[in-house]
Amino acid sequence: MIAAADPTRELTPALIRGSRGWVHPLRTVELAPGLEGQLCRHVFAEGAARRESTIVLTSVPEGIAFAPALVCRDRRELGAGTPAQLPTERWAPTELESTAFNRRYRLLSLAGQDPVYVREIFSPALIAWLAHDVPDGFSFELNERHLVVALPGHLNGEKELGELMALAAEVASRLREEAAEEGVASGLFDEAEKRAAIAAGLTKVRFKRPPASVGAALEAFRHAARWRPTVVLSGVVCALLGLFVGAAAGALFYGPLGAVAGLLTLSGGFALGREIAGYRYSWGPISAQRLALEAFIAEYARCHGLREIDRWRFHSAHRHLPLPGVAAHVMAGPIPGTDLGGLFLTLGDAAELRSRGQEIAYTSDRPLAAMAVVAELEDEADAARVASAAEALTPPEGRESFSLERSGATVAIWRPVQGSMLFTAKGFDAFRAEAGELLAQLDEDGEHPEVLAVAAH
């Protein structure tokens, strides 16, 4: 059963609520056999702007490798504006061979998505259906497997709600069918441009030894940015602000001599302002925080005999494997404590970032990331035995328990992490060793998990 996600999260741009908006879940519905959806009322309210809609939120995990994000908006209801975008991404408009469709809808996909795949989704039959047969104001959005289908206004009648659920089922079915038809190497999302920008940014720091954590890598990039003009300017502004506040406070409490003491704040204000600006600095579109994460992963992989592979190819090859988010990094290599090969993944579960156009998020409400070891076993019986062993394990003190997902003979052993900026080499080592210990139990029966086929590419 594919369960719908939490509708209170802003998982697609259409779910943005604004400062005074809200969302009210009505009920969970079955859109199709094995596919759940959340039926909700939604309000966007910001300043004088207000928009009411009724939505269905469901999931299309099979399509992550081909279409991480897609927006099909009714122009009269949601306007011709472009949703927020991340610094390293841009929305690209697509016009189809239908004047009626193009007049009614604004179709956007992320630059890097295969235009042929987008056009295959919108078959002539689907285009005609959308252009002529669906109610006014109909829109849908896809973001990191989350699908939102919306109609304007707060629908009340069971007939109207039933029609909306049928529309959602139809869109989800079309997206899932098209994803199922793609080959492993075809139609993949292409992020070569972003990877080139990251590679250029990584040259700004050379590590004498691998950073012990993402935080340590971030400190190195902050240090590298300390004399950049905008960083220095931020330090100067902060120093002058500190001087003004310090002098005013000194004069208020101690008179003219106290005002002179404000000069003492110059040095501290400059250092503080420059340090904050260094953490926020970006080389081109890539922030210091993103570069720190990428540098940490690259150095960890290099020192542990791991090889990074295309994350979209992984998702394509394992489109039916349930995972707690989207793969951020996929590394192929040995599984510690065994003679086996497999994949080590980091995953992110923060679709809100794209909806809001933010690159980094922090929250204590739920984990935003995860790490996983994925292995292809001999058969489904082996996968079932690993699942049973995982359920019986007691995690070490201070650590969360494993979770395990499987699809056929493929298993994914994973553990949540509060956020990707909290990754550490020690945490990676401990998790991979524990996952290896679990998989090594198969050796007792002479069974050996194999390297995933995707890892060879």
Image (tube, rainbow, N blue to C red):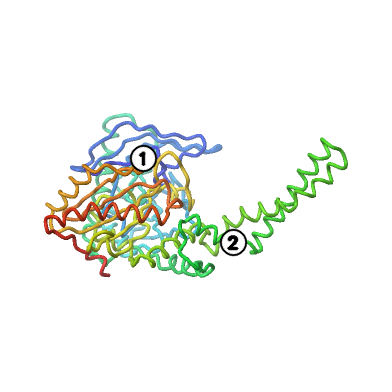
Residue 198 or residue 19, whichever sits in front:
198
Q: Residues within 10 Å of mark 2 (few under 14, many from 20)?
A: some
Which of the two residues, 391 or 274, is positioned nearer the viewer here?
A: 391
Residue at (55, 37) in percent of width and height: 48
Q: CA distance from mark 1 to mark 2?
A: 50 Å
Using the image as rendered, state which of residue 34 and residue 301 is in the foreground. 301
> What residue is drawn where x is 19% and y is 52%?
407
Q: Position of residue 78 (x, y in %)?
A: 44, 46
Residue position marked by numbered label 1 in the rendering: 151
| Residue 101 appears in the rendering | no
The disc label shown at residue 380, or none: none
Where's the N terminus, which quadrant?
top left
Quadrant in which the C terminus appears: bottom left
Q: Residue at x 35, y 39 (%)?
A: 6
Q: Amino acid at mark 2?
A: His
Task: Please tell me whether mark 2 sits on a helix, a strand or a loop.
Answer: helix
Mark 1 burial class by Cα count in 10 Å: few <14, some 14-19, many 20+: many
Left-right relation of 295 to 33: right
Q: Position of residue 450 (x, y in %)?
A: 19, 63
Residue 154: x percent and y percent?
38, 32
Q: Nearer the viewer, mark 1 or mark 2?
A: 2
Identify the residue under disc 2.
223
Of labels 1 and 2, earlier in sequence is: 1
**Of the residues shown, which amino acid type is indicated by label 1?**
Leu
> Residue 173: horizontal and vertical position, in percent?
23, 49
**CB atoms at circles 1 and 2 under 8 Å apart?**
no
**For the view shown, which residue lies furthest in the right direction?**
256
Q: How many marks?
A: 2
